[in-house]
Amino acid sequence: MTRGLLDDVDMQRIKAKLPDVIPLRVKTQVMHPDLMCAGFDVGSDIPLAAICLQDASGVLCAANVALHEYHAHSIYYRERKDPPQEMVAISMETFFLDDLAFRLYAAAEHLANAIVFMLELTDADLAQFRESRVSQQSIVGHYLAAKLPGNDLTKAATRLAKCKDWMHAMGYRGRLVHDQPPPVAGLGITYRRRSRWTRGGGAAKLTVQLNTGDEPEFAVEEIYGFLEGAFRQLLISTDECVRYFESMLNAVGITLTVDKPGMHLRFEST
């Protein structure tokens, strides 16, 4: 374990800062694709959207764990350790924020695949939108914008794509995977991947300054800010897609409800 235990007061502080993913998780867990087959033509892939939505909500639950541990490590190393260990705090906070970035990307990919199944899109439908794109969320998003501009799924996807925090979050995640991770303040001397030679003292004179490093790009609080905002917007957009799928089920006479207490599923088909 990378931190010590926290008391109930600290745990409640953390809980108050987290998005509530449980209602979305419950909604998707009662979506049984085998039962849904009764409402659609034989061979229809629409029920498979339920599986993708379950996958998305599951990853969002894991993302919440990462965010929880970001706060927990922050409290432990900044407030509970004596003396405080700020560098360790920043190192562990960055670790869990990076994990959050990866999970947000994965959840959005599952959501994009859910839309593919809901709309029964084929490879041919998406072919022209695959050029220079790898991410399924980008491919599906461009398809929706071009072909179904007024659809509620398009609106949900567009709100996510245009969210500034989401754009920052996906840019950050892309750099973690494809480039040098952005230097974070508080982790000691850091170096960017650039020429170490600088020109000075005359046009022909090049020098290297030893052991000075480069300026960090982010404070850990900045990374937290846009990732947390991106998380909340993805949660909203996912819930909107879940509600769209529920309306599709209702249209073919399928109603899924959860009876409390006990979380019993009631499946109704007309």
Image (cartoon, rainbow, N blue to C red):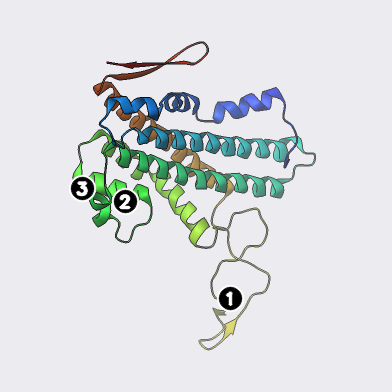
Image coordinates for residue 162, horizontal then vertical, percent: 33, 44
Q: Within the image, what quadrant is residue 199 found in?
A: bottom right
Q: Which label belongs to residue 261?
A: none
Please, what secondary structure does the residue beneath circle 1 have? loop
The mark that comes first in sequence, 2 or 3, is 2
Position of the N terminus, as image quadrant, is: top right
Tell me the amino acid under the disc marked 1: Arg
Position of the C terminus, as image quadrant, is: top left
Residue highlighted by disc 2: 139
Residue highlighted by disc 3: 146
- Above or below residue 32? Residue 134 is below
Image coordinates for residue 49, horizontal then vertical, percent: 36, 35
Crowding around mark 3 (Cα neighbors within 10 Å: few <14, some 14 to 19, many 20+) is few
Residue 233 shows up from this direction = no
Residue at horizontal 20%, vertical 37%? 150
Image coordinates for residue 197, horizontal then vertical, percent: 57, 79
User: Given contact means CB atoms under 8 Å apart, are the residues at marks 2 and 1 in contact?
Assistant: no
Q: Which label belongs to residue 196?
A: 1
The residue at the far right in this view is 82
The residue at the far front in this view is 42
* C-alpha gap between disc 2 and disc 1: 39 Å
Residue at horizontal 51%, vertical 57%? 177
* C-alpha gap between disc 3 and disc 1: 46 Å
The mark that comes first in sequence, 3 or 1, is 3
